[in-house]
Amino acid sequence: MTYAFDAYVTAALFDSSRRAIFALGDGTVRFESGESVEAHDGAVLCACVHPSGEGILTGGDDGRLVWSRASGAQEIAKVPGRWIESVAASPESKLIAFAAGRDLHVRDAADPAFSRTFTHEKSVADVTFDPKGRRIAAATYGGVALWYARIESQKPLYLKWAGSHVVSAFSPDGKFLVSAMQDNQLHGWRVADEKNMRMGGYPAKVKSLTFLAKGQLMATSGSNGVVVWPFAGSTGPMGKQAAEVGYDEAAMVVRVAATPALSWVAAGLDDGRVWACDVTGQRVAPLKSEKGAAISSVAMTPDAARVAWGDEDGNAGVAEVNP
């Protein structure tokens, strides 16, 4: 199934019912089932699934955080005069985190009165929760700050590394934190002792990264194939080499999505193609063979049965993988 939305696809996501939802640059949220919700007066800049699993949360250049369901949109928070450029949610703790400029904001889906704000020296580029939803990582210039989500007055643990950090992810066991940087490399830390892990060698900027296979592997974009790092054991990828699957010298992988428990990954390419692969068998299943605008977002259901994608020109689709 394909769609032509005529607006940049900021995010393609699956809610808990395995329904595809698309957040667009024209401020709307479109549902696979046909509904369209006017979420923002301006562009959607970021999106994630709501902690309940129903509908999605979007941040916009109108300074609003909105919960969109097929039945309509509900404003969750507003930061006048700011752009909300990153949002994350934890099904475990029911907490929501979003970044606006130098501030990290926290809300509780179960308690509308709850609010926390943590301020950084530089703008926050990305926010992500640890597996239990108790700590939040805020990627910024010079490293990543770790905050306890519910504690009002605190000093964060700063995992430092020179440069601009733009995308981050915790390993599913919470032992490692990995950050993609502005200059074509990853940097990781073992959280317990802040041990550094340099993970370079990329020909392009890493725009997305995700863990799979119960945390044994991590997949990233930024090369001609999907780069897969081993994370088994107490040392993670330290001293180990990455593998590359689905290598294609004619294109670069710019977006990845994966299955938390399984070894499947989906890849979106800069020439508009989309494929999925079981990285243990390296059998590549083409899902969109027609070339076009660069893929801007890709998502995969936990059972690896469905993949959704969107591109920079507003084209989108959903495909069955049949793993």
Image (spheres, rainbow, N blue to C red):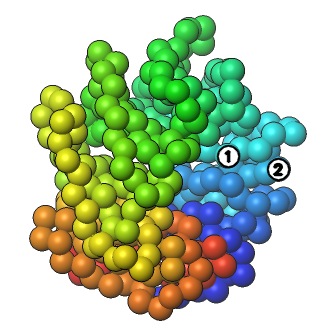
Residue 302 visible in the current orientation: no
Q: Is residue 101 above or below residue 37?
A: above
Which residue is pictured at 69% across the width and 32% down the height? 123
Can you identify the residue that label 1 sits on? 85
Mark in the foreground, 1 or 2: 1
Q: Which amino acid type corresponds to the residue marked 2 in the rendered image?
A: Asp
Q: Secondary structure at mark 2?
A: loop
Q: Secondary structure at mark 1?
A: strand
Q: Quadrant of residue 321?
A: bottom left
- Which callout, 1 or 2, points at the residue further toward the start of the chain? 2
Q: Is residue 29 above or below residue 67?
A: below
Q: Is residue 307 left or right of residue 241?
A: right
Q: Horizontal and vertical percent for residue 206?
A: 46, 53
Can you identify the residue that label 2 sits on? 62
Q: Is residue 106 left or right of residue 131?
A: right
Rounded to the nearest angstrom, the CA distance separating label 1 from label 2 is 11 Å
Which residue is pictured at 71% across the width and 58% down the height? 44
In this view, the residue in front, 218 or 92, is 218
Check disc 1: other Cα within 10 Å, few if <14, some if 14-19, many if 20+.
Answer: many
Check disc 2: other Cα within 10 Å, few if <14, some if 14-19, many if 20+.
Answer: many
